[in-house]
Image (spheres, grey):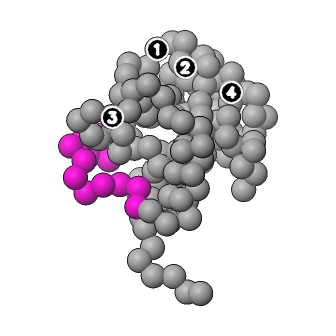
Amino acid sequence: MDIEKRIPLWSAFSELFLDTEVSTSTHTFIARQVLASELAPELVVDILWLEVFPALCDNLRSVAGEWAGFDEQWLCERILAVADRQVAAYSPLGLVAVNQVIDVVEVEWLACCAYLPTSFSKAQRPSLRNIKGSGKRRFWQWR
């Protein structure tokens, strides 16, 4: 995992998970970051759905989620901890179902794709099983 190349995307995608309205300027900002990354559309989609989504989904499932923006260091630590399954991604106490957040983020991602080459909107989103499974914590680990 090339973390340095991912950080700008993690930060840009995190805007989709703030407890605020997502604007056209947010969509264009994310699209610029995606293009600047020079990553393949399939990888960009995986970064959104399998790295950022599991780490930040719960912010949109709570009553008063973060709205001012995520600290970059915290964001990186959170994404890496969830990816390594050191922490669970999805709280069982969320007021909104994970599937509902997937629907919301998918709409916003497609709005971002309006400012990107069509290959990005055609890149397949991972299955619901993979998205939800990427956020499950390991309760045991072979050492």
| Dominant SS in magenta | loop
The crowding category of the residue bearing disc 2, from other C-alpha atoms within 10 Å (few below 14, some 14 to 19, many at least 20), is: many
User: Which amino acid is tagged 4?
Assistant: Gln
Earlier sequence position, callout 3 versus callout 4: 4
Q: Is residue 90 magenta?
A: yes
- Write down the region rendered in magenta: 88-101
CA gap between label 3 and label 2 equals 20 Å
In the image, is residue 121 above or below residue 31? below
Does the rendering let one see residue 45? no
Q: Is residue 63 magenta?
A: no
Give the labeled residue for mark 1.
Answer: 23
Observer-nearest residue: 81 or 9?
81
Observer-nearest residue: 121 or 142?
142
Observer-nearest residue: 130 or 26?
26
Residue 48 placement, left or right of 104: right
User: Which amino acid is tagged 3?
Assistant: Gly
CA gap between label 4 and label 2 equals 10 Å
Give the labeled residue for mark 3.
Answer: 65
Does the rendering let one see residue 2? yes
Report if the CB atoms under discs 3 and 4 are less than 8 Å apart.
no
